[in-house]
Image (spheres, rainbow, N blue to C red):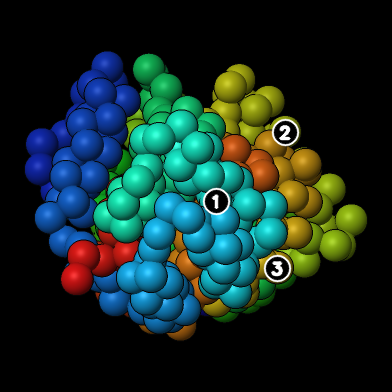
Amino acid sequence: MPYTFFLKKHSWAGQAVSAGAGAGLLQKLGRVLREKAATDLERITKGTSRTREKLGVVDELFSYWTLEDSEDTLEQLEDLLITADFGPKTALKVVDAIRDDIRSGRVKTRNDVRARLKQSIVDVLTVSGKSSDLEFPDAKPAVLLIVGVNGGGKTTTIGKLAHKYGSEGVKVLLVAGDTFRAAAAEQLAGWAERSKAQLLSATNLKQRPDSLMYSAVDQAMREGTDLVICDTSGRLHTNIGLMEELAKCKRSIGKRLPGAPHEVLLILDGTTGLNMLNQAREFNETVQLTGLVLTKLDGTARGGAVVSVVDELRLPIKFVGVGETVEDLQPFQAEAFVDALFPEN
């Protein structure tokens, strides 16, 4: 029933988390999830098939590689990266890194230039120096604010995060802050049931999402909740009024718990191409993002575009969604992502 008060308590999987151990457990689980993802590259490889297809000509290009004609080859490589949605600025940065190594004598052979191309893209994806792990505070609760445009996969991502952490014994509270879409609360209720999480929804149609999030953090602090994940209404990044409401939500969370939210994650639909760059700019200006989640990496995605977002905003990718099941949200690893784009023959 939409916009009624949902608050369900469940028994938590595993041993209960003590007040002082919540953050430590969350950090440990982050490492565990990352290690699991490292053993399963098949999903990432499948999800990047469209981008990989566009980049398939690169190996053919390198088959004619000579130092004497390197400049012509690099110009063609730059064009190929642009057609794969890397964007002109980022494509030039990647190619310039290779060009510098050729001039210095560090790159000489066809294999050298291919390896340097991959490393150059990894360097862009990690240039921020910020961790791709979720950053949790020393004391609980940890608070995540999830933002993005309509249809990007916010609610599904929240459900998958709740499942990953809840199944390991973390006490999770989901906040149905999407008060514009009646079905959103019902969808989140379904995820709460599956993940053994608590759910807090608006008590009436007039309750503002910023007020709801304040109440949620207050409840989490009183009840010893480990992790609070706040859903928000999908909004066009060009709608000034709705973007300001999003800023109010963030401020409201911080009023109840200084320093929160600890992560503000932008959900980016991997099929949108370079349009995601404009989205990221506006959301970052409004709520100061801490990271990105790339969704719908299911074979139709234009994965090169996210490299441009990372390059311009210097924000780490935290997760990638590569399918519909709960296991298909994986911690991001730059090397694995690039290996999927340029697999060894």
Q: Residue at x 40, y 35 (%)?
A: 105
Which of disc 2 and disc 1 is earlier in sequence? 1
Residue type, mark 1 in image: Val
Q: How many marks?
A: 3
Which of disc 3 and disc 1 is earlier in sequence? 1
Report if residue 14 is visible in the image: yes
Which of disc 3 and disc 2 is earlier in sequence? 2
Q: Residue at x 28, y 70 (%)?
A: 45
Helix, strand or loop at disc 1? Answer: helix
Percent of width and height locating residue 8: 36, 56
Helix, strand or loop at disc 2? Answer: helix
The answer for how far apart the CA atoms under marks 2 and 3 are is 27 Å
Q: Is label 1 in contact with label 2 (beta carbons under 8 Å)?
A: no
Residue type, mark 3 in image: Asn
Q: Is residue 112 above or below residue 60?
A: above
The answer for how far apart the CA atoms under marks 1 and 3 are is 22 Å
Q: Residues within 10 Å of mark 3 (few under 14, many from 20)?
A: some
Per the image, the residue denoted by label 1 is 95
Q: Residue at x 37, y 35 (%)?
A: 106
